Image (cartoon, rainbow, N blue to C red):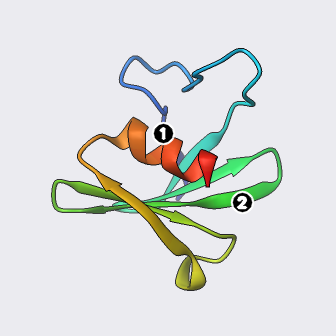
Amino acid sequence: MEQTIPTTRSGAVLSASATRSECEVTEVVDGLHHVRRETTTLGFVLRVGRVYVALCGPVYNTAIEVGQTLDFDEAVGFVERG
């Protein structure tokens, strides 16, 4: 079952500027989050222990790693910026 996960701790959608589009982040399976904007898949955030790995690309098994961080919101930002 898919569960929508807020992209910030407060539950508000992550937005660094007024011009940036909001992304939808959904937990697909335990520890794997799908990041998309409207109908376009931007990538994924994978939780590995305490680390969040940001992956860009429309297909999980071919997505490219673009960063690692201890902060979920920052990992989503890595995916948004590609």
Q: Position of residue 40 (x, y in %)?
A: 79, 56
Percent coordinates x, y for residue 18 in the rendering: 72, 14
Q: CA distance from mark 2 to mark 1?
A: 16 Å
Work out whether 65 lies above or below 37: below
The one nearer the camera, 1 or 46, is: 46
Mark 1 belongs to which amino acid?
A: Ile
- Identity, as a three-letter code, of the amino acid under mark 2: Thr
Quadrant occupied by the C terminus = bottom right
Rendered position, 54 above or below 38: below
Badges 2 and 1: C-beta atoms under 8 Å apart?
Answer: no
> Dot 2, how many residues are within 10 Å of its Cα: few (below 14), some (14-19), or many (20+)?
some
x, y (%) of residue 78?
50, 49
Depth check: give the residue in front, 11 or 55. Answer: 55
Q: How many marks?
A: 2
Q: Earlier in the sequence, mark 2 or mark 1?
A: 1
Per the image, the residue denoted by label 2 is 41
Within the image, what quadrant is residue 17 found in? top right
